[in-house]
Image: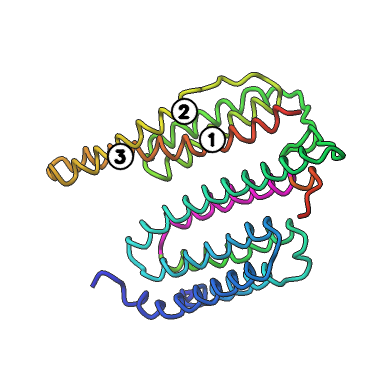
Amino acid sequence: MISVSLFFYFGIFLAIVGSIATAWGPGVSDPVVRTFNTEIASIGVCLVLLCYNHVLALLTLLATTVIITLILFRAIIRLEEMGADV
Amino acid sequence: MFVPQAFISMYLPAIYAGLIVGFIGTMAIAINRRELHILILTDIVGLAMIFVVSAVGTDLAEALILPGLVVELAETLAISEILITREMRKIEQDPRANLAKSSSIFPQAFSLDMEIMTTAPNFIALVLIGYGIFLTGFTGGAVAGGGIVLYALSKKARGLPVLMLDGIAGVSGIAWCLWIIGFLLFFVAPQYWLLSLFLAACGLLLKVASKVGLIGLLMREDIDNE
């Protein structure tokens, strides 16, 4: 039997570490790296939602994370092609 | 008791974690100067919101997380569009800059000639849309919208014409009407709760599916430019 609280605290740990990595982590001046680092925090939130039995919220979070990543990549690509300061 | 005993002991850690994550996100937003980075960091603050809401631990939390996520998605989409448009205007005003015409989410041209590329997307899109209509509600809308996006992308990536639906804004209005009628009926005539539930669910299905289809439309315009 795996204890639920282990997953819960590991989710919290991942979320905090991921948000620190997004804010001040190595190489975050590149927007692509920053976008990938948000995924770590997102996985942490997924674990917490799993512990709370919020299935619908978990599925919606996964779907919106994918769509938000696509939107951000589109914005990054277009801005970099136009030669903007990103 | 509505909240299980296990969730009560998880309440304080979740709230504190949400506060810490939100503090880190807002501090980084305050330090950063570039708009695109601020847009990415807004995602972190959204995750902090999910932490605080999920600490409630009942069905109410689930019901509150869904609209929060959708609003965050719409907000990100709108702000990224504004950033791109503003940068385009800056470049147009500068006579020395030359605007590159091709810009797409798929940087490389997609030229594969296989039978499965012409038949499989239609079938998968059909299955996704059918399953989405069966599910109804928010999840069904997301699944059906995913089917629409897949169909539009797979058709346009091969350079084929896509059936244009101009009345997609009208669908959104009908969806709102269904939702409001269902909500009203729920209070006026509670004995028809099943009917009102299904009205609201179908309205939400149309709403979300048309919104996700709109994202596919945006990406299709990108590919059009090639």
Residue B214, label in figure: 1
Element under label 1?
helix
Q: Residue at x 57, y 34 (%)?
A: B149
Badge 2 amino acid: Ile
Disc 2 element: helix
Q: CA distance from mark 3 to mark 1?
A: 20 Å
Q: Which residue is mark 2?
A: B168
Mark nearer the N terminus (1 vs 2): 2
Within-10-Å neighbours for mark 3: few <14, some 14–19, many 20+: many
Q: Is residue B205 above or below residue B39?
A: above
In the image, the segment drawn in magenta is A53-78
Q: Nearer the viewer, residue A85 or A33?
A: A85
User: Total label count?
Assistant: 3
Q: Are marks 3 and 1 on the same chain?
A: yes
Q: Is residue B99 above or below residue A23?
A: above
Q: Are marks 1 and 2 on the same chain?
A: yes
Who's the residue at 19% across and 45% down the image? B186
Residue at the disc numbered 3: B179
Residue A30, image x and y in percent?
77, 60
> Are the residues flagged by discs 3 and 1 in contact, CB closer than 8 Å?
no
Does B108 lie within the magenta span? no
Residue at x 60% of width, y 29% of height: B152
Residue B221: x %, y % from top left: 65, 30
- B53 shown above or below A13: above
Quadrant including the C terminus of chain A: bottom right
Please give left or right for residue B144 compared with residue A72 in the image.
Answer: left
Residue A4's mark? none
Determine the residue located farthest toward the right in the rendered image. B96
